[in-house]
């Protein structure tokens, strides 16, 4: 087994944990790989440096991997995903003022129910329009991100048109909290730890965990250039094996303290250990000075088959792009999107047993609407958009 | 060269932005504006309506610009990033220097080439300047540590300044270390023994 050095770009977020642990706990070294993890400040940088070959692999927003492969929003660069680094992990946070308005609009209904909260949002927006107030503004991290699609899906379910009734703006995650406190935005959808930071500062209420909207959505992936992978099957298999072992380490509760300490390091996520710990426990304080909410599915790293790249998931991400007019609907695009997620590499690396949970893991399970069918994206989009128009 | 081109620089570093803006003006581009604040970046960009946007790669707001590529009612004009496969060398040079450029769709590549080349050389010049400054600061702090170590040795060993320095240099040579490293150990030890 020859030693191979890989340069891998990442954004300092808890969902890059499998990469960090594979590098820092020797799982990569055991596979004869040496990982050089490079911290980046923007998804655009990660994508561009992967594109031009400065990185061999990257921690990437799952929709960016699909968009790059299709050549939408940017230069076309076919990418492959042999491993999903994390599913879920996001939350929707709103300002205390908007939370108050939603509570009032819900009229005693349970805001924890996304159907109720999205309808309350529609009422708040109608009321604001009547009195000539500015549209509500929501922050998300990137046009091709589950954060964008989560917010849009949730809003549309309540009859809110995300392109007409609100302003959606891209904000780098470190600026989210500032923007909420300075009232530049009324709410945002972002990953850990930023929702918890807003709650601790007393300027935000976590309205929903991402998995309230989509029970399981591919969030971050490990991506490589398709051309690069051509004669590196063995390297990819070893990388997947190292990430799988890192995920096992992460999911063992006995390792929590060590995991949190490793991730809190300045060259990794570099935030307070107790905030990182909340993410892995799925236990988040949801209101300033208020109660904690625990959900084991808040973030999934390699558990329950979450790491296996399902072509149906890539198709679902593509369907979101079609729904929100980021991409045209075409059979070629659908095929290219599906080809981006490679369960075959994953299975070859980890053996057939890894595929056991497939039936369970290829479901997105949104809180409303029909189950997603990758063979009928037109029907999926039409049904959801009809629902939006009928409100 | 087209002096009518409207250029916007997004950079939080005022010195580098100034170096860049000066270079562009010297080259005849008179319409150069700088945006430093990160809030409402897109609103500022839309109001300036630039033909070319230059942004520092270390600026997290690069992702904000990604929104300009989206078809939406707020977009005035489509903007494309100056990255396409045929220009691999130019892109690598730009990324190495730490600069990224976005241009209004339809602007000819030849017209932007000069601007990008100029930016790359200015960014590199700025990086060199920063490195030199860092080296100078390091040298200064090394000298301070050596001075303190000399003072300690002179007091404890009751030797002259020249002898104290000779002791540091000899130890450094024997241990194959830098004089500043040995001086630092002397200072640390003296602090521990205080």
Image (spheres, rainbow, N blue to C red):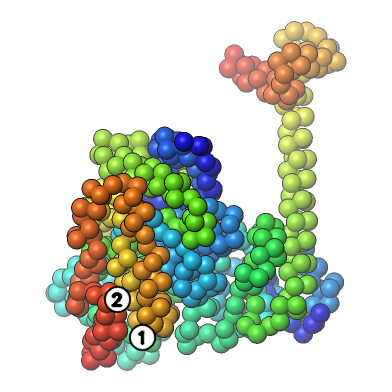
Chain containing mark 1: A
Element at label 2: helix
- Residue lying furthest front: A231
Q: Nearer the viewer, residue A183 or B97?
A: B97
Question: In terms of depth relative to the viewer, which is nearer, B25 or A309?
Answer: A309
Residues packed near mark 1 inside 10 Å, few (<14), some (14 to 19) or many (20 plus): some
| For residue A55, above or below residue A139 | above
Which residue is at 62% across, 16% downward?
A: B189
Q: Name the residue under label 2.
A: A153
Helix, strand or loop status at disc 1: loop
Q: Give the label on residue A51, or none.
A: none
What residue does disc 1 label?
A: A165
Q: Depth check: give the residue in front, A8 or A125.
A: A8
Q: Nearer the viewer, residue B172 or A386?
A: A386
Marked residue chain, label 2: A
On the picture, is A54 further left or further right than A71?
right
Tell me if I can see residue B109 in this picture.
yes
- Residue A136 percent across, percent down from the top left: 38, 79
């Amino acid at each position: 087994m020859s030693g191979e050095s890989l340069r891998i770009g990442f954004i300092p977020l808890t969902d890059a944990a499998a990469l960090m642990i594979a590098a820092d706990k020797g799982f990569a070294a055991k596979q004869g790989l040496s990982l050089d993890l490079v911290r980046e400040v923007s998804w655009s940088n990660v994508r561009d440096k992967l594109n031009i070959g400065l990185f061999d692999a990257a921690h990437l927003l799952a929709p960016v991997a699909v968009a790059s492969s299709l050549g939408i929003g940017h230069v076309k660069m076919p990418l492959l995903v042999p491993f999903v680094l994390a599913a879920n992990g996001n939350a929707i946070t709103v300002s205390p003022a908007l939370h108050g308005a939603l509570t009032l609009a819900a009229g005693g209904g349970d805001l924890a129910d996304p159907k109720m909260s999205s309808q309350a949002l529609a009422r708040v927006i109608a009321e604001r329009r009547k009195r000539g107030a500015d549209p509500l503004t929501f922050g998300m991290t990137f046009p091709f991100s589950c954060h964008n699609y989560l917010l849009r899906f949730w809003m549309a379910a309540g009859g809110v048109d995300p392109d007409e009734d609100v302003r959606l703006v891209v904000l780098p995650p470190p600026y989210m909290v500032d923007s909420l406190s300075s009232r530049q935005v009324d709410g945002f959808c972002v990953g850990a730890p930023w929702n918890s930071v807003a709650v601790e500062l007393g300027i935000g209420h976590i309205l929903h965990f991402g998995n309230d909207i989509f029970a399981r959505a591919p969030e971050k992936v490990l991506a490589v250039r398709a051309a690069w992978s051509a004669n590196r099957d063995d390297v990819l298999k070893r990388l997947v094996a190292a990430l799988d072992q890192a995920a096992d380490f992460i999911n063992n509760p006995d390792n929590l303290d060590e995991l949190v300490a490793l991730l809190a390091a300045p060259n990794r996520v570099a935030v307070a250990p107790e905030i990182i710990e909340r993410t892995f426990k799925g236990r988040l304080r949801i209101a300033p000075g208020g109660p904690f909410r625990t959900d084991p599915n808040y973030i999934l790293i390699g558990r329950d088959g979450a790491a296996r790249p399902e072509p149906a998931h890539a198709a679902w991400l593509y369907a979101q792009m079609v729904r929100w007019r980021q991409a045209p609907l075409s059979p070629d695009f659908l095929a290219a999107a599906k080809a981006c997620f490679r369960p075959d590499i994953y299975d070859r690396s980890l053996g057939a047993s890894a595929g056991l949970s497939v039936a369970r893991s290829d479901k997105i399970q949104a809180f409303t609407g029909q189950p997603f069918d990758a063979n009928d994206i037109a029907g999926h989009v039409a049904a959801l958009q009809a629902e939006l128009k009928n409100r | 060269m087209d002096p009518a081109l409207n250029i916007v620089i997004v950079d939080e570093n005022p010195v580098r932005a100034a170096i860049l803006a000066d270079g562009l003006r010297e080259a005849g581009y008179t319409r150069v504006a700088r945006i430093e604040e990160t809030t409402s970046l897109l609103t500022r960009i839309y109001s300036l309506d630039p033909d070319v946007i230059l942004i520092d790669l270390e600026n997290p707001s690069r992702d904000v610009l990604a929104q300009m590529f989206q078809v939406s009612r707020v977009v005035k004009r489509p903007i494309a990033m100056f990255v396409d496969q045929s220009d691999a060398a130019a892109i690598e040079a730009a990324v190495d220097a730490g600069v990224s450029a976005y241009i209004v769709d339809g602007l000819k590549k030849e017209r932007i080439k000069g601007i990008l080349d100029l930016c790359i050389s200015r960014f590199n010049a700025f990086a060199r300047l920063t490195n030199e400054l860092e080296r100078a600061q390091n040298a200064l702090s090394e000298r301070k540590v050596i001075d303190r170590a000399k003072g300690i040795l002179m007091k404890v060993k009751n030797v002259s300044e020249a002898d104290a320095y000779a002791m540091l240099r000899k130890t450094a040579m024997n241990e194959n270390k830098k004089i500043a490293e040995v001086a630092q150990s002397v200072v640390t030890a003296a602090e521990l023994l205080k």
